[in-house]
Amino acid sequence: MSRFIVFAILSIGIVLTAAPQRAFSQQRIQIGLVAPTTPKDSPDLFKAFFEEKAILEKALSLFPHQQSWTWVIYPDEATWKAFTHHINIDGDGPTRSYYGQTDQEAHVTYLRGWTLTHPNDDRALPMHVIAHELAYPYLRTRSLRAADDLSVEWVRKYTNEPPRSALSIP
């Protein structure tokens, strides 16, 4: 993974305007990008990152989430595949695709950026994917089913999107 550079972990302090029952008073969110190049060499890749970042920021304004967290966006499929290979998961298996990975101990979530701007099916809508990853630390669980159930509830409650499961779970 050393051949990839982390271009910018944009540290932003955000005070969310969400209802008090949904948000903590002060948020410190870091949103970063992993890219194999520089903005000058790949302007389209960095443009995609900022589009994906805007979708993530919108979701963070809607859903409950941890006070301090780092989000890393992999804006293209090549960097996402390298990441999933690095952590020994099959990014696209025969029964499921991976759209995000949350490490609760490290307080970091990795997102497949392409999914945020190019959803590939009804189960991988951006708000569903983000809500699903947010649900793990919110519930303090590793249960795929529990995170999925809560993400469906949040999408129903906080967005205008139809409530669908973020993942297909047999």
Image (spheres, rainbow, N blue to C red):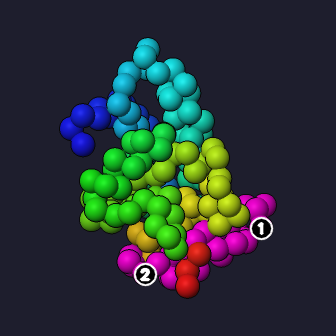
The residue lying at 35 percent from left, 55 percent from top is: 84
Residues packed near mark 2 inside 10 Å, few (<14), some (14 to 19) or many (20 plus):
few
| Quarter that holds the C terminus | bottom right
Q: Which residue, given by chain and number where applicable, does mark 1 sit on?
A: 162
Left or right placement of residue 16 versus residue 156 in this view: left
Tell me the magenta residue range.
140-167
Q: Give SS at disc 2.
A: loop
Q: Is residue 95 left or right of residue 40?
A: right
Name the disc covering residue 143, or none.
Answer: 2
Q: Disc 2 residue type?
A: Ser
Q: Is residue 144 magenta?
A: yes
The front one of 6 and 76 is 76
**Picture disc at residue 128:** none
- Residue 65 visible? The answer is no
Residue farthest to the bottom, as pictured: 170
Quarter of the image containing the N terminus?
top left
- Residue at coordinates 35% horizontally, 31% vertically from top-left? 36
Circles 1, 2 touching at the beta carbon (< 8 Å): no
Q: Is residue 60 above or below residue 157?
A: above
Q: Image quadrant of residue 39?
A: top left
Task: Name the side, left or right, on which 22 lies relative to 27.
Answer: right
**Where's residue 89, x and y in %?**
34, 64
Residue 59 picture location, percent across and down: 60, 53
